[in-house]
Image (cartoon, rainbow, N blue to C red):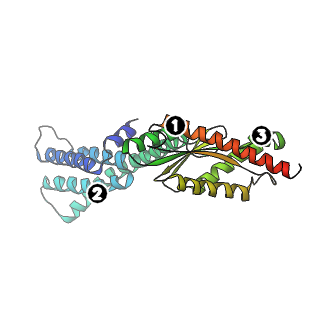
Amino acid sequence: MLTQSLRFVLEERAVRFFVVGILIALASLFSLVDTPIEVDSGWLFVIPVAISSIAAGLKEGLVVSLGAAAMAALFDVSHAETASSALVTTVFAARFALYGITAGVLGAFAEAHYAVQTSFKRLARLDPLTKVANITTFYEEIDVLEAAGTPFAVVMVDVDDLKLLNDRYGHQAGSAAIQTVANVLRRATRGTDSVARYGGDEFVLILRQSDRTGCQIVLNRIRSTLLSEGIPSVPGARLFVSAGVALVGEDGSTSEELLATADAAMYVDKALRKAGRSKIVERAGL
């Protein structure tokens, strides 16, 4: 909790350097003041070393340790009756050993702790089955785009006839189909776009700076890829999807309006595609 809070406060490098610099200056000032009780002022330099290690990690902690050891050695030698390069080197080495160990322990702990926290946060933003974003992440990104006034399109994608696939090949095939669609959606979109699982067999895409023509190009790419690849674990099974598009500003201005429009358009597309497949079957005499 301490490391996380400290990292948040001192995340800005300029703020962190200012705080560490002030602490080193205070430790140096204390080293120059004569006190009635003999106090090893060198221990005060541990504080900026600890803060930099926790806030920025091992590397920066070691750099601050070098500076703090040099300052502490300088002040220690200034109080000695005789000064020599050997004495400076010895004091510097002793101080750096203390500060370096402090930086090593706290820096390594902070980096490990922060890595675990980052991993947990990343997992909390993903759908566990498909490893694409979850719906919470989708809404958060929509809010950011709306606040920034960035043009974008919302595309609702639904896997066709998933129940028939489950009935014919089993529920594992259905899960494999959903994972396959998620992988294809991720590959068919740009790095600046987003793919999220809306729920069940439905996905939503956020396509930035895209119009209806651009959305249709992406959908054509998705459908052709699904048709050619199918489901790797289920030979012979074919995957089809229905989709609906909503453009911000034209079809709505909020996430609720855009999703409603895209969802309605997707169901229209699904009905048309189902009717089209039925006609193909009738013509084939099946």
Percent position of residue 191, x then y: 51, 56
Helix, strand or loop under label 3: helix
Location of mark 3 (residue): 171
Q: Quadrant of the N terminus?
A: top left
| Residue sitting at x 12%, y 40% | 35
- 82 relative to 145, above or below: below
State the separation of the CA atoms marked 1 and 3. Answer: 26 Å
State the separation of the CA atoms marked 2 and 1. Answer: 45 Å
Three-letter amino acid code at the position of disc 3: His
Which is nearer the N-term, disc 2 or disc 3?
2
Percent position of residue 32, x then y: 12, 48
Which is nearer the N-term, disc 2 or disc 1?
2
Location of mark 2 (residue): 66
Helix, strand or loop under label 1: helix
Location of mark 1 (residue): 136
Helix, strand or loop under label 2: helix
Percent position of residue 229, x then y: 72, 58
Crowd around label 3: few <14 · some 14–19 · many ≥20 (10 Å):
some
| Residue sitting at x 78%, y 43% | 165
- 50 relative to 230, above or below: above
Asked whether, in this view, residue 89 is left or right of residue 144, the answer is left
Three-letter amino acid code at the position of disc 1: Thr
Which residue occupies the foreground of this view, 66 or 174? 174
Disc number at residue 20? none
Crowd around label 1: few <14 · some 14–19 · many ≥20 (10 Å):
some
